[in-house]
Amino acid sequence: MKNIIVSLLVLLSLSSFTGDKPAYRIFNNEGKKVKYKKMLETVKDADVIFFGELHNNPIVHWLQYELTKELYNEKGGEIILGAEMFETDNQLILNEYLKGNISIKSFEKEARLWPNYKTDYKPLVEFAKDSNLVFVATNIPRRYASLTYKKGFEGLDELSAEAKSFIAPLPIEYDPELKGYSDMMKQMEGMGHANPNLPKAQAIKDATMGYSIAEFTGNGKTFIHYNGAYHSNNYEGILWYLNRYKPNLKIVTITSVEQADVDTLSGDNTDLANFIIVVNENMTKTN
């Protein structure tokens, strides 16, 4: 009798919970829910993985780290890391730190790190350091993106040969009708201060990241790249340039969005990428 009463109390206690409250869900490009394991199984065979993030979302950063660790194990260490958050002219200091030639204090003081580096990107850098992995600084130095915003692509022609070595080869191709660039212009026009050089500044970033990635692919290793989702959404941005610098790569894209309801993918978010991570919009931020 005592056991029956205890069992009833346990059942009553469990019934007081109305159900799970998931922080995130994963969907495929058609809007169907998929398991994390399915995503891992798919990406492990890719030449390049684009992990599009929301820069201040802790769930997304945690998933980046977990996927990287598990991909490393699945591939026997045959992976390369790269990120928008590190600029090409900081490759030397990044390499010096990864090889143990300089202290963490020197690295964090001298490299131009993002404000949320310690919470969101440091774990990836430290994993690369501990695992003897290559970590590629892929993005254009921000001063040259600013120059493009002010003077267009023509402004880059004024740079020295050394400066140009940190940028994708000039002149770059540019298609203003790509959705990411055209949407950017429409948004600026709606705010009343459109600058046609704004999407060009975005494009020179995308081109430089694509060129940086291309230099490290085709060697049997999987390159996983961390970038703002808008740089790889709709299979454009960096992908558009990468496919020109090195065609026929097997590319898998992951993106991240926030919604009030994580159980159903919004129509606006369908087919942004091969996999869409939906995080509850009430999630706390990291910066």
Image (cartoon, rainbow, N blue to C red):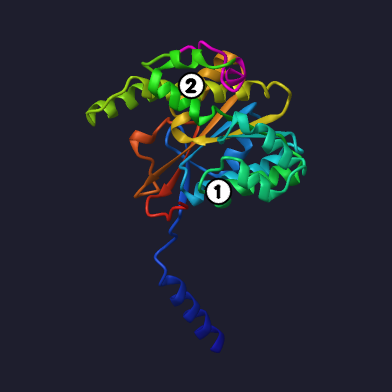
Question: Is 206 rendered above or below residue 59?
Answer: above
Q: Is residue 152 left or right of residue 160?
A: left
Identify the residue under disc 1: 120
Q: Find residue 38 and report its horizontal and vertical position in percent.
A: 58, 40
Question: Is 6 rendered above or below residue 23?
Answer: below
Q: Residue at x 52, y 43 (%)?
A: 114
In whole angstroms, how far apart are the C-alphas of marks 1 and 2?
25 Å
Q: Compare residues 189 and 178 and report the one nearer the observer.
A: 189
- Res 246 seen here: no
Q: Compare residues 143 and 44 and report the one nearer the observer.
A: 143
Q: Compare residues 84 and 283 and report the one nearer the observer.
A: 84
Task: Find numbered disc 2 in the image and state the secondary structure of the residue it sits on.
Answer: helix
Q: Amino acid at mark 1?
A: Asp
- Disc tally is 2
Res 204 label: 2
Task: Find numbered disc 1 in the image and state the secondary structure of the residue it sits on.
Answer: helix
Q: Compare residues 78 and 132 and report the one nearer the observer.
A: 132
- Whether residue 171 appears in magenta in the rendering, the answer is yes
- Whether residue 201 appears in magenta in the rendering, the answer is no
Question: Is 51 rendered above or below residue 158?
Answer: below
Q: Find residue 3 and report its horizontal and vertical position in percent.
A: 56, 85
The magenta stretch spans which residues?
161-173
